[in-house]
Amino acid sequence: MTPLKPVVEVVNLGRISYGNALQAQRRYIRRHIDSLSQPPAAEPAVNALLLCEHPPVYTVGIRTAQYPVEEEERLNGLGAEFHRADRGGLITFHGPGQLVCYPILNLAHFRKSVRWYVAELETTTIRLCRKFGIQADTSPDTGVWVASNKICAIGIHCGRYITSHGLALNCNTDLHWFSHITPCGLKGKGVTSLTQVLGREVTVSEAVEPFLETFAAQFNCTLRC
């Protein structure tokens, strides 16, 4: 008998603050954690794919040493929020025009390997870019790149093989926000977007459907919208 594909529930959170998105992630993580204590015959928790956009916000990950208060205040002064997160990676920006995806997955339903999971996120994004006619690739630095410009940032957290945080794909993001930081701590590298590469406006709404198609194929799962 062919094993059933994992089911992943698609949840569109819309435009939501970073803090509220963190709370949403925690609710879905708790659903998985609670299911781990259930008898083996119990129905497993359904995986989730949280999609959203954020108002302007700078976030730093766990690889960042204590971020200077002066820098935090400077970034707040630009009109953006500032958050410390338990994801991997250094400082980055999230804002309107960026497709943010938070997969809350139990990797036991897929493959219990964080390295594999990050590679699958990268490949998903590369295949999505290909649908738009863009040649994107990986590099020694995490994320997806078009030449030396990052088009998609990836930073995850994984505890007990339950994933959170995820990826942020620049669709028609105002890239000027990145000029105030060194994105992901990578000096000499740039950022780009679907809009900038293609020379036409590509909205988050336009990117969602091909993203979901690519995610379902790459992770060999069934999406439930």
Image (tube, rainbow, N blue to C red):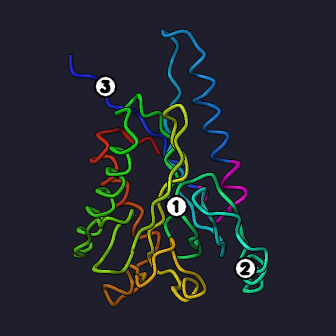
Asked which secondary structure carries label 2, the reply is helix
What kind of element bears circle 3? loop
What's the residue at 40%, 42% (across, down)?
114
Residue type pointed to by label 1: Gly
Q: Which mark is residue 89?
A: 1
Residue type highlighted by circle 3: Leu
Residue 91, percent from left and from top: 58, 70
Q: From mark 1 to mark 3, how far is it between C-alphas?
A: 34 Å
Residue contact between numbered discs 1 and 3, judged by CB atoms under 8 Å: no
Q: From the viewer's perspective, is the residue at label 1 or at label 3 nearer?
A: 1
The residue carrying mark 3 is 4
Residue range highlighted in magenta: 13-23
Quick check: 141 above or below 118? below
Residue 207 placement: quadrant: bottom left
Q: Are marks 2 and 1 in contact (CB under 8 Å)?
A: no
Asked if the residue under mark 3 is in contact with the one under mark 2, i.e. CB atoms within 8 Å, the reply is no
54 or 183: nearer the viewer: 183
Q: Is residue 82 above or below residue 39?
A: below
The vertical placement of 172 against 110, above or below, is: below
Write the residue at 78% across / 80% down: 70
Distance Cα–Cα, label 2 vs label 3:
49 Å
The residue identified by callout 2 is: 71
* Residue 223, position as x, y percentages in the image: 40, 42
Q: How many neighbours does mark 2 have within 10 angstroms: few (below 14), some (14-19), or many (20 or more)?
A: few
